Amino acid sequence: MFRKLVSPLLVLLMACSMTTVMAEGTPITVTDMYEREITLEEPATRVVALSAADCEIICALGCEDALAGRGMYCDYPESIADVPAVQSGSETNIEEILALEPQIVIMSDMAQSEEQVKLLEDNGVKVVMTRNTDIEGAYDAIEMIGALLGRDAEAEAMVAGMRAAFEAIKANSEHAGKTVYFEVSPPEWGLYTAGTGTFMDEIAQMCGLTNAFADMEGWAFISEEQVLERNPDYIVSVSGMPDADMEIMEREGWGEVKAVVNGDVFNADADAFSRPGPRLKDAAESLYRFINDTDAQEEPAA
Amino acid sequence: MKTTDRFSRRGYALFVLALLAAMLLCICVGSVSIPLSNTLTALWNTLWRLPMPQGVSANIIVHVRLPRVLNVALVGASLSLCGAAMQGLLRNPLADGSTLGVSSGASLGAVIALVFGITIPGTDYGGVMLMAMAFAFGSLVLILTLAYALDRSLSTNSIILIGVIFSMFVSSAMSLLISMADEHVRSIAFWTMGSLSGTNFKQAALSAAALLICGSVLLRYARELNAFAIGEDNARHIGVNVRRVKLIILIVGSVMIGVCVSIGGTISFVGLVTPHMTRMIVGPNHRKLLPASLFSGAIFLLLADLVARTVLSPVELNIGVVTSLVGAVAFVAIFYRTRKAR
């Protein structure tokens, strides 16, 4: 409890100091995740963000108004639907972005080419790259985006809140040697799972679980027999399909898997689990609640 | 005369034995190693519907490996039989569902059915399967019409050229669909790469039925195919109804390819490689070649799937990766030989 109170206070203090700095009109300089330096005279007010996670961060910082455009797949929060959508990923359309006259474009290193980045910069748009492969990376992204938007305090608070939530989960979870298997896609399309070095793996560890496929690096197609053989205690579906848990419970040949026997199959919010943004906290808490059978209202006590 | 013309009993027995051996091998070996005795008990009890022993290994054998092995064998047999029949019909050693672009056409049909939610009420796979068949036939007609229009002799070069062009057209149509319907991207990747993981008994029953019906039709036309092998005119002169036979073989072939694609996606080169290997063993007579291709196709695909399942275990490869690797080499070898023969 104590920790929960302290961090907002700290943040508030920091916020006061920050705003004074801002008021003096010092230019903002950030280093993005590709070690590129970006300098702004003042906080950005017209931003295009291509990745869903970065959009979520911007909105969670209270800067939805600063969004001049969003990538096609940015769909959270719902109100974001009113923001003009642009192509992203391998279909990134530079003209479309330039037409929105943004000051900065925030993109993750998905499929944009160096030429595209250069083209944007030649047209006077500053490009900020994010690359989030772990939760620490998500913190960095939040702080960086906070700085660009002049919301350092809010960003600090958000990160502190996430840290506190994760710490609380960790403190309340015991490593009892239970295993979890994350199902990213069902056998129909080839079983696909998340190994080490993914957010899902980090969240599992937080909750005291061991990833059944900890020997895999990143994302991998795996064989169905391996899942049955490894016999996980929990199955978390992040396929984003409705009723994925029901389908797994009734899946032919899976009836003796521990998770299925005990009904420990969880249809998780795929977006929360896979987007390196503020909702990682929700993802971790939902898994914690699921394995500890607590009510939705109850939070892990700090 | 008949004994040399037909497939001898001993020949059949040998192929059946080889197929059974391959199936057994594929059931016994997998990503998870299971003691042979457990495997055989599970298999025995399934065959005679005895109560199953408890435990993971029985589940793996019965619900993962057995349906998959059946599906692989049936798809392999169907694709190979189709390939052999098409090569005979078109008198072209490189004709096959994948080189002609029929398989990619079928997968486009399947993807369209998925993206636009075309289903047949009361069936699980009906819509996808029907669209795959329709598109397989449509692409075959389109490809052959184009080929005939460009070059009446239907030479190897023009067939390959048109196959390449058509496959490119299909892949761009797929990209278009992908950008229109983002939620289906993952499943679209499945159709283009091909995999038989996660297949079930229901699908095996479907492809068994297709193979039984279409296969027996194709086998009945072995004599006509022999006549075609010498030349279309020759076939006509000895009383073959050329148009009818052609149409029937093409329709039946498209149905089989459509079923295979709707179950396993595009699995390239099976129909190209195995008839050639088989021809080396049993010779060019279609009365032997067709049934032999059926078995060797099943065996080839079983072994390819075994490699896909085990070589990087616990990671699984797409079966198309393995068949394309073998197939591309064979393709070049065959192409080289046919060019040299001229």
Image (cartoon, coloured by chain):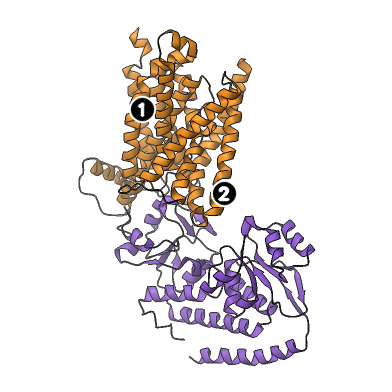
List x then y, in percent, for residue A182.
Answer: 44, 62
Q: Is residue B335 visible?
A: no
Image quadrant in which you'd find residue B196: top left
* Residue A169 vs residue A120, the one in the foreground: A120
Please tell me whether mark 2 sits on a helix, a strand or a loop. helix
* Residue A106 vs residue A29, the one in the foreground: A106
Residue drawn at x 53%, y 49% as measured from the top left: B177
In the image: residue A5, left or right of residue B221: right
Image quadrant in which you'd find residue A115: bottom right
Q: What is the drawing colour of chain B? A: orange
The disc at residue A43 is none
Q: Do the residues at pointers 2 and 1 share their chain?
A: yes
Type of residue at label 1?
Answer: Gly
Residue drawn at x 43%, y 14% as measured from the top left: B226
Residue drawn at x 31%, y 35% as measured from the top left: B209
Q: What is the drawing colour of chain A? A: purple
Type of residue at label 2?
Answer: Leu
Q: Is residue B288 visible?
A: yes
Q: Which residue is labeled 2 in the image?
A: B176
* Residue A228, above or below B285: below
Please tell me whether mark 1 sits on a helix, a strand or a loop. helix
Parent chain of label 1 = B
List x then y, in percent, for residue B84.
Answer: 45, 24
The crowding category of the residue bearing disc 2, from other C-alpha atoms within 10 Å (few below 14, some 14 to 19, many at least 20), is few
**Of pointers 2 and 1, the one earlier in the residue sequence:** 2
Residue drawn at x 54%, y 46% as measured from the top left: B174
What is the C-alpha distance between the residues marked 2 and 1? 35 Å
Q: Which residue is labeled 1 in the image?
A: B215
